[in-house]
Amino acid sequence: MTGATLGMSETYNKNSIPQKVALQSSFDFIEEGINALDVSNVSIIADYGSSQGANSIQAMRKIIDCLQKQKKSKIDPLVIHNDLPTNDWTSLHRLLNEDKTYHGVASGRSFYEQCLPTNSVAIGFCSTALHWLSKKPCNIPNNYSVDCLRNPKAYKLFQQQANIDYSNFLQHRSSELMSGGILILVMLCCNAEGKLGFQCNFDLLYKCAQLLPMTSNELDDFSIAVFFRSYEDCVDEKFCKQYSFELINSKSVLIPSPIYKQWEEKQITNDEFARLYTEFVRSWNESIVEQTLINNGRQQKEIPELLNRFWNSYEEKLRNEPEKGHSSGNYSYIILKKR
């Protein structure tokens, strides 16, 4: 079973506002990370999990600005944006051509593999991507996402896969980083009790799937290959020692949904909230619904209508009950330095 995401939808750049807020909250850690950087020169900066680039480009500009202010690079570095081969690279290249503040190229390979030459990277950066697993270890009966109380057996398999993936990620980044190089991570996590601040959203997605004329096999297959680690898992000293990393700093931050906050403060109407929140969720979830239908033999001509029905149901439910969109994210911010 694979079941891993093939990438974000074509509207991701426009609708990834919560991810943007989480990334911008890393700017102080970027400054601290650059301060800890100890290499003779910075020739390559790697951006792991770039998606379509709107958020990543902001982070890369911040990193380069810090390098210039701290006089830590004698040459203009090359930024390598990494994501899956199935990523929407056209959108990223379009933004790079419009931006022109740095030299950027693309690497289409899973970051759970080695993506770049050994000892070549001075700075690595990865934001809100590591909760996506390399594969789905099993389907989740009667649920869209795995939960330790509802699905204890499936939860254990997802947890094992998450440990393997995180280990592989750190191993390959350690190989790619130069001694004295830094790795800055922004990871979406569970809270101290193992709960998510957006479980109601996942439950709503499954309810909308049940409203479609889906077969029992399709409903079983409709589950997402993500796992939200604890903060303690993210800063596990075992991984640091094993892969020659020093933990420079870390923190856990709770960030409320900026879209829900707008509605709560009456800056937007119910209709506007339902539309904006649906567009946000659709931007990262569309491929999951579509893959489920394709993998179970649906004809291509059926799929657009089913997708529209799914998202119309989702938006209508949020319009009638905006509280179901109440969400927040627990984020772990981490700076690692290669010994």
Image: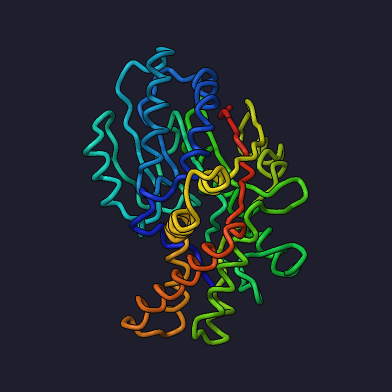
Q: Residue at x 41, y 57 (%)?
A: 8
Taking 321 as reference, is 212 left or right?
A: left
Q: Nearer the viewer, residue 333 or 202?
A: 202
Q: Is residue 258 above or below residue 226?
A: above
How many tags in the picture? 0
Q: How is the image coloured?
A: rainbow
Question: Where does residue 172 sit, x and y in percent of width and height?
Answer: 51, 44
Q: Residue at x 58, y 53 (%)?
A: 165
Q: Nearer the viewer, residue 248 or 143?
A: 143
Question: Where does residue 330 sit, x and y in percent of width and height?
Answer: 64, 44
Q: Residue at x 55, y 37 (%)?
A: 185
Q: Residue at x 68, y 38 (%)?
A: 235
Q: Nearer the viewer, residue 200 or 116?
A: 200
Q: Nearer the viewer, residue 37 or 20?
A: 20
Question: Where does residue 90 sit, x and y in percent of width and height?
Answer: 26, 52
Taking 297 as reference, is 10 left or right?
A: left
The quarter of the rendered structure image containing the C terminus is: top right
Q: Is residue 14 above or below residue 313?
A: above
Q: Residue furthest left?
A: 97
Q: Is residue 194 above or below residue 44?
A: below
Q: Is residue 213 above or below residue 37?
A: below
| Residue 171 visible in this rendered orientation of the protein | no
| Residue 130 visible in this rendered orientation of the protein | yes
Question: Where does residue 173 sit, x and y in percent of width and height?
Answer: 51, 40
The quarter of the rendered structure image containing the N terminus is: bottom right
Taking 31 as reference, is 156 left or right?
A: right
